[in-house]
Amino acid sequence: MLLDRFLHDTAQRFPDKAALVCGSRRASYAELERHTNALAHALRALGLLRQQRVAIHHDNSIETVEAIFATLKASGVFVTVNPQAKPDKLAFLLNDCGVRVLMVGARALAAAAHELASCPQLQHVVVLDQEADAETVALLQQAGRQVHRLDTLRAAHAPSLPGNRNISLDLASLIYTSGTTGRPKGVMLSHANMDAVSGSICTYLQSQASDVILSALPLAFGYGLYQVLTAFRTGATVVLEKQFLYPYQYIEQLKKERATTLPLVPTISALLLNLKELDARDFASVRCITNAAQAMPASHVDRWRRLLPQARFYSMYGQTECARVSYLPPELVDAKPTSVGIAIPDTEAWIENEQGEVVTAADQPGELIVRGPHVMLGYWNRPEETERALRPGRYPGERELRTGDLFRQDADGYLHFVARKDELIKTAGERVGPREVESALYEMQAVREAAVIGVPDDVLGSAIKAFVALHDGASLTQAEVIKHCQRRLEKFMVPKHVAFVAELPKTASGKISKIGLA
């Protein structure tokens, strides 16, 4: 099935039902259907062709969801970009996958205008919220870019359903994830990939049209995106928070909208559980809690279980390359608190040792391999990295995903995460390539050597720690390092800890030894 059918089909069944709630705004399924149809016609009128890329760089909002589904209905490929991404990184992503249309907020557009003017394949910019300032518009127009207002484009086209020219094998989305080289990689996901995994998620979560999902997870990442996809598939309502800044406001929305489903990451969990006036009565409507990011501390799980005995708690594991791999049935949470369970429906997952042999003995670590219809098509323009991640599968033409993560199976066959094989750090639900952080550190003239690792953290799962060696006679403070990183990097990439050392440990070949640092 094509993903845009999730919205269209549900709009026929529940036209007047709230599909999205954002603050005081509400949008019904019928309204979203009309708006996305008109915007899809507008995109085609701008010249968007089948399988061309549309980037969406905006906070969680009704307009962001409209942009996603309008792109799909126009037979395009949507590329959601982290709203925290700096202008140079935004420009890199646009150039990397040849984006033709950028949908963006006015403030982010003004900040990135100079970088966007140098993106050769970018033709159109659609402003999703307020009017773009005249200086920004003039700069982009001088560079040959056309700037449009979302509401103006929609109003100029009929809300009739456009004919989608794609089939389920075609590309639906590129989701960028950090790479070990420091360059973000575009994970290519087809309509069939995303249809398969969203259906599997709905099956094991027992999703219902009556669900109300309260999500502060960014739509630019898989965990947040699939909250909307699974809801639109079933006819549920999504209450979108722009970001998780005010826990009390979050709880007020929970009570007001009577949320039934809470997708959490350890950071959000910790902030909620630290509230002094936390009252189980505020969560009376909740029937399901999920965690698919960094493993949640067992103490958090225990407290949620005691606070909300009526709710089912799902510990899950996944990667952007396939969205989900496994889930722990809620009835086993107390018996296996450190497990991420068994393979999701219509998926196979197993462990192999370094010789490529299947590990059958209990508690023997090895790399997790995944087989299923949700495994990505590959990385955009990264053939070598695709070759490393995807290997020939069981049958001709099929490919299996090497996750790069070490797991073990207990005696009952349930999976337990051990460690990452590569250097990627998973912090606050995000994947961070150390080299990107190290590159930012090396921009500081005082820095001679720098290395970044992840260290255990009860809230973040792993916190980023930077080790810095300075040039002779140079001086820096931790506050100066962090302030520099805040200017150059997304919030979740900024080191929490900075250690100054005279010399970084080296291997025999002279490379920095991160094992020595750890």
Image (cartoon, rainbow, N blue to C red):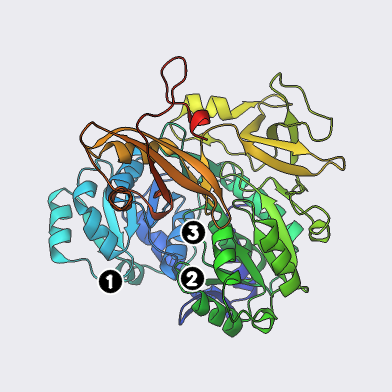
The answer to whether residue 174 shows anywhere in this view is: no
Identify the residue position indicated by label 3 in the image: 219
Residue tagged 2: 241
Q: Residue at x 51, y 42 (%)?
A: 454
- Can residue 52 be seen here? yes
Residue 226, quarter of picture = bottom right
Work out whether 22 lies above or below 514. Answer: below
Amino acid found under the numbered disc labelled 2? Glu
Foreground: disc 3 or disc 1: 3
The amino acid beneath tag 3 is: Leu
Q: Nearer the viewer, residue 258 or 201?
A: 258
Quick check: 365 above or below 10?
Answer: above
- 342 sits to left or right of 226: right
Q: Secondary structure at mark 1?
A: loop
Q: Depth check: 131 or 263 in front? A: 263
User: Circle 3: is it few (<14), some (14-19), or many (20+) Cα within 10 Å?
Assistant: many
Mark 1 residue type: Gln
